[in-house]
Every structure is written in C-alpha cells, then in structure tokens.
Amino acid sequence: MLAQELKAAFEIDTAFVVLNSNEACSLPYSMIHCPPAQLLETCLSMTEGRPGALLVHLSGYGYSADGAPTLLADALASVRKDCRFRVAVYFHELFATGMPWRSAFWHSRRQRNAVRRIAEGCDLLVTSSRYHADWLEGEPVRQSAAPIQLLPVFSAVGETPAPTPVPRRKPQITVFGLVGTRQNAYKKMAFRAGMLHDLGIKEILDIGPEFNAPRELNGIPVRRAGALAAPDLADLLSHSIFGFAPHDPPSLAKSSICAAYCAHGTIPVVASTFPGEIDGLADGMNILSPRTAKGAREAGLERCSNAAWRWYSGHNLRTHATRYAAWLMRAE
C-alpha cells in the first residue's frame, strides 16, 4: 500500500529486497530475494552502481524467530560503510521484555543490541509510539542529528474520507485479526460483560480465518463473517459502531487493528482503563474502556467516532508517503 501511494502521489517507484524468505509473491513490483550478507551487492545491482536510499520497515519477530535482527544489523552496517546508500528505518517494535521463565527475557539483550546498532547509523528514524521514540532518542549515538519522527501505523484495510454517522451504524462490536489475536480478544471481553452492556452492544461480529469462535459471549450472539477481502472488511467496519482492540493501551499506536478501526470512524474499545493520554489516544475521547463506556454512550457516540477518525487522519497513508517521499527525494 505504501508503494502504491508513493507511486500515485509522488511518481516514486519501489523495489523490494527480501532477506529472510524465499516465498514467492504475486505483487506487481520488482522483488529480489537474497541473503543478508548480499544486501549491498543486490542494491548496487538494482541501481547499476548509482547512489540510492533504503527504506527499512523493521519488525524484529517478523525478521527472525528470536526477535533479534542481528544479521540485518550486519548487512546495514556494510551498506553504511560503503557510503552510497542512505538508510531510513521505521521501527514497528524495538525489543521484548518478560519474566525469566519466558523466552523474551533471554532474547531481550540481543534484541536491544541489534536495534541499537541499526539505529546508530540511520539517516532517518521513524516509529509508531512515544515510548519507542524516547528510547531511540536516549540510547543510540546516531550519525544523524535529525529528530526521530513519530507516526502511528496506517490502516492495512483502507481509509474513509469521512466516517459514516453513528445512527447509520449497527450496535455491534467487531473482532478481527489472526486466530491468536481474536482468541485473546474473546478472553478479555469475557470479563467485561458490564462494559458490553453499557455500550448497548447487540451483536459481536467475528472477522478472520476460521477457528472455534464462541457462538455467544455474555449473552451476546457472535456472528462469523470469515476471512474477507480488504474492501469488504472496510465496509463492515464502516457500519459497526465499535471495534474491540485486544492490545494494551501502550501498544495501540502500533496496532494495525486499532488503525483500521479509527480509519473508518469505528470506536476502539479496550478491556483496561488508562490514565491521561497515550500517543494521542485518550480514554473517553477517541477510545473507550470499562470506565468510560457508559458515560460516552449517554453523552453521544458521534463525538468519539469523529475523534477516532481525526486522530487517524494525522498519520494516514498519505502522511506516511509524504514523509518518506520528502526524504527519498533529498536522497537522490
């Protein structure tokens, strides 16, 4: 989607270099699979030896099973040493933490070291949350003095230019994502019967790959829609008042699920309350929790729907593309 927007809005072409998979892809873009150690040579072959720029979207666990992208750090160090390519990185995550009996505890140091090495040599750093930005500002000694930019993730299922008014929506709450994500959502919602009642929810809409989802939850029927194409999913979101966000509030800015809700004016609902504001999200304003559900419904939900959509509009797909385009064109 980002490649499409860069082309449509700025006439910038995209080629993909894949370092950790040989899986074929049908997308209409130039795509090269290579080992991390061959990143520099591959990029030079694509530019015919001319200088260029790399935009890296980094998810540690998406890159390697232990969440520590050490080989990627090595590859980018070689690219920077060559001096012909500038490097920008969007950090979708940094490192995991956990108790000693969890694997994250044992991998955390290696993850931090790899992320630190990647960040130190970047010309542009972008990330999704203030927590990530603060860590990146404080930890690495970076080659560039440019400020770290904060951009919550954009929706992977499209956006709407104006949200559907709440009276035209159904009093339902959507649950969508991969199987594990939805299982977690149902576990959390099971303990929040009062919140679901306060919101006046009449139906739970389950969207995603098939699994043994409950037929009802706290007396509310669950309707299964199955896995849907993005336009069909977007249409259902646009006609649902609420969407359940299974992540904890500090992780919402990096949640593509929360982004999809807000992009369509669907009010995100979380299972836990939180004080103040996190990454521009405020309980009772553009997101609802057990503490604010009843009051928000009594005051009118249109305000929350519009506030969620406005929050998203500040970092929508065009905003991401504009930031990267400005940097890429300076890199030419």
Image (spheres, grey):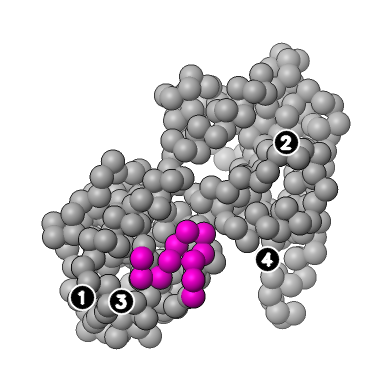
Is 284 within the magenta?
yes
What's under tag 3, amino acid-wise?
Answer: Ala
Residue tagged 3: 293
Q: Nearer the viewer, mark 4 or mark 2?
A: 2
What is the count of numbered marks?
A: 4
Q: Which residue is mark 2?
A: 123
Q: Earlier in the sequence, mark 1 or mark 3?
A: 3
Query: Alpha-carbon distance for marks 4 and 3?
Result: 31 Å
Amino acid type of the residue that numbered disc 4 sits on in the rendered structure: Ala
Task: Say few, some or many: other residues with alpha carbon within 10 Å of mark 2 (under 14 / 14 to 19 / 20 or more).
Answer: many
Look at 44% across and 78% down and name the residue there. Answer: 273
Q: Residue furthest left?
A: 168
Tell me which label, 4 or 3, sits earlier in the chain. 4
Image coords of residue 253 (percent x, y): 50, 57
Numbered circle sitting on residue 279: none
Q: Secondary structure at mark 2?
A: loop
Q: Is residue 255 visible?
A: yes
Q: Amino acid at mark 1?
A: Glu
Q: Which residues are magenta?
A: 275-285
Q: Residue 198's spot in the image, x, y percent?
A: 25, 80
In the picture, which quadrant includes the C terminus? top right
Q: Is residue 40 left or right of residue 256?
A: right
Whether 42 is among the magenta residues is no
Pointers 3 and 2 in contact (C-beta within 8 Å): no
